[in-house]
Image (cartoon, helix red, strand yellow):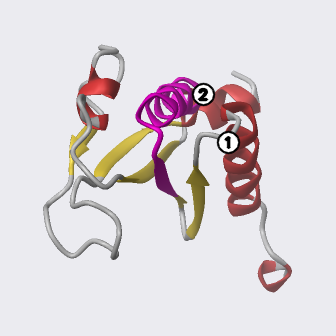
Amino acid sequence: MTDSDSVARHPVRLTISPRHRQPPPISLLDWIRRNPQYQPVVRQAGGGGGRPGFTDAVLIAVLAQGLLPGLFNLLQSWVDQQRTEASVRIQAGDTEVELQVSGRTDSARLLAQATEALRAAREPGPDTAD
């Protein structure tokens, strides 16, 4: 097994918060769950306490990094169709990064940003040197 195979299986936690003014014709959760691969790993979070302007429809996913490209493609297609935005918080280990997704966001660029953040999380910082 190569290092890239190991990394692709390393789990990450995502928190996805869609932003919209009125309920969409199809919820983000239903949109993502149309793909059976994501049904067991994406769920609705507990309600309430969201940021202003964001709905309580926050999704939580814990999945292997290898599944991120497909999830980001689904998220981007939903955002494009709904003409809305979403916030994605990605947590790997002690590092967390937040990305904003809009109709102008390229899913490949989103994946690149997430991959870079996850790489930074794996690399030991200067404080961990012996």
- The mark tally for this picture is 2
- Compared to 51, does 84 lie above or below? above
Task: Say what secondary structure mark 2 lies in.
Answer: helix
- Compared to 102, does 89 lie above or below? below
**Looking at this view, is 28 or 9 the one in front?**
28
| Residue 23: percent from left, percent from top | 21, 44
| Residue 61: percent from left, percent from top | 35, 44
The magenta segment is 67-89
Res. 105 mark: 1
Q: Is residue 18 left or right of residue 74?
A: left
Name the residue rendered at 56%, 36% in the picture.
65
Q: Is residue 7 left or right of residue 89?
A: right
List the single residue furthest toward the bottom: 127
According to the image, label 2 marks what residue?
69
| Residue 59: percent from left, percent from top | 29, 48
Q: Is residue 14 left or right of residue 90?
A: left
